[in-house]
Image: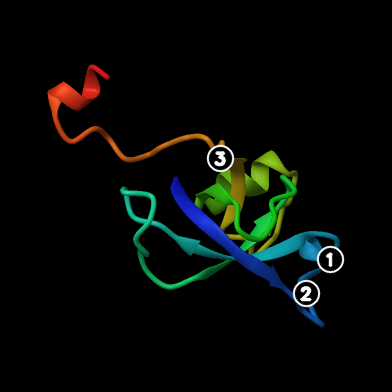
Amino acid sequence: MQVALVLGNAISTVKHRSLENVKLLVCQPLAADGRSRDGAPVIVADYMGAGAGEKVILTSDGAAVRELYGLENSPLRWTVMGLVDPSHNPTPPKSKKEAKR
């Protein structure tokens, strides 16, 4: 599982037939702090309806995704598994004193 920022849509003129009606996104994986980049952007299948600027939870478990969506033979690797609540603050408190606030 990986938190990522949706940068925008990916447009394809030719797709594998298992992805013909699937929205594709360009997502930037984020580090544990929820802000820093963690690697290169990836193309992601979106079954959840995410949009540009949203944070999402990705999975790269292709076998699980193929089973979940009933795809037998698909090149699908990355997919959106959930949307991150915009009010969620992934940065932990810096001290025990801040944690009590």
Classify residue 26 by image quadrant: bottom right
In space, the residues marked 3 and 1 are separated at their CA atoms by 30 Å
Which residue corresponds to mark 3? 86
Q: Give the numbered dot on residue 20.
A: 1
Residue 34 location in percent, x, y?
38, 50
> Which residue is situated farthest in the right direction here?
21
Residue 48 picture location, percent across and down: 72, 45
Q: Report the number of discs.
A: 3
Amino acid residing under circle 1: Glu
Callout 3 environment at 10 Å: few (<14), some (14 to 19), or many (20+)? few
Question: Is there CB contact under 8 Å for labels 2 and 3?
Answer: no
Quadrant in which the N terminus appears: top left
Q: Which residue is label 2 attached to? A: 15
Q: Amino acid at mark 2?
A: Lys
Q: Position of residue 90 (x, y in %)?
A: 37, 39
Q: Are marks 2 and 1 in contact (CB under 8 Å)?
A: yes
Q: Residue at x 40, y 57 (%)?
A: 30
Identify which residue, 42 or 76, lies in the foreground: 42
Q: Amino acid at mark 3?
A: Pro
Instruction: Identify the element where label 2 is drawn.
Output: loop
